[in-house]
Image: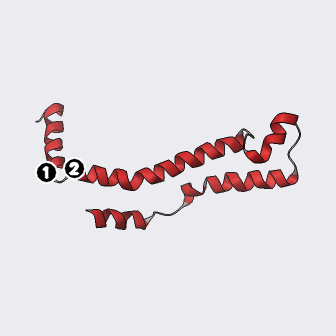
Amino acid sequence: MLTLLSWGDSLQIALYHFGGPRILKTYDSIRSPFANYILTTARKQGKYYEFSAPEFYNIQKQGEELSEEQKLTLREKITDHWSWASTPVNFEDQRRVIAVL
């Protein structure tokens, strides 16, 4: 039975043989834009939760209550910012990976 260290070495050799570095580079080029989109969206959404988005500056400065229009805007923005979680699998990413490999 192989030790964990030798198993890892064997796996590294196998991955390298099958183009591991190229596969990882391809994966990174495909998934990084999506991860950056999630990061940007999360940052924007945090501003809505804290009422620090441009539409809500009057709430922070004056302590006013939300108007009906602001409530609708808040609901819409928060719902839109979570839309990435319910989107189906993006087969376009799979096609791009196959084309690159």
Question: For the point 41% across and 67% down, which residue is it?
Answer: 92
Question: For the point 19% across and 53% down, which residue is it?
Answer: 19
Percent position (x, y) of residue 32?
42, 50
Q: Quadrant of residue 53?
A: top right
Amino acid type indicated by mark 2: Gly
Secondary structure found at label 1? helix
Secondary structure found at label 2? helix
Q: Nearer the viewer, residue 58 or 78?
A: 58
Q: From mark 2 to mark 1, how far is it between C-alphas?
A: 7 Å
Local packing at callout 1 (Cα closer than 10 Å; few below 14, some 14-19, many 20+) is few
Question: For the point 81% across and 51% down, which residue is it?
Answer: 71
Percent position (x, y) of residue 27?
33, 53
Question: For the point 88% across and 35% down, which residue is it?
Answer: 62
Q: Are marks 2 and 1 in contact (CB under 8 Å)?
A: yes
Amino acid type indicated by mark 1: His
* Mark number, residue 20: 2
Q: Is residue 27 left or right of residue 77?
A: left
Q: Which residue is mark 1?
A: 17
* Mark number, residue 53: none
Percent position (x, y) of residue 16?
16, 48
Q: Is residue 46 left or right of residue 74?
A: left
Work out which quarter of the rendered image holds the C terminus and state it. bottom left
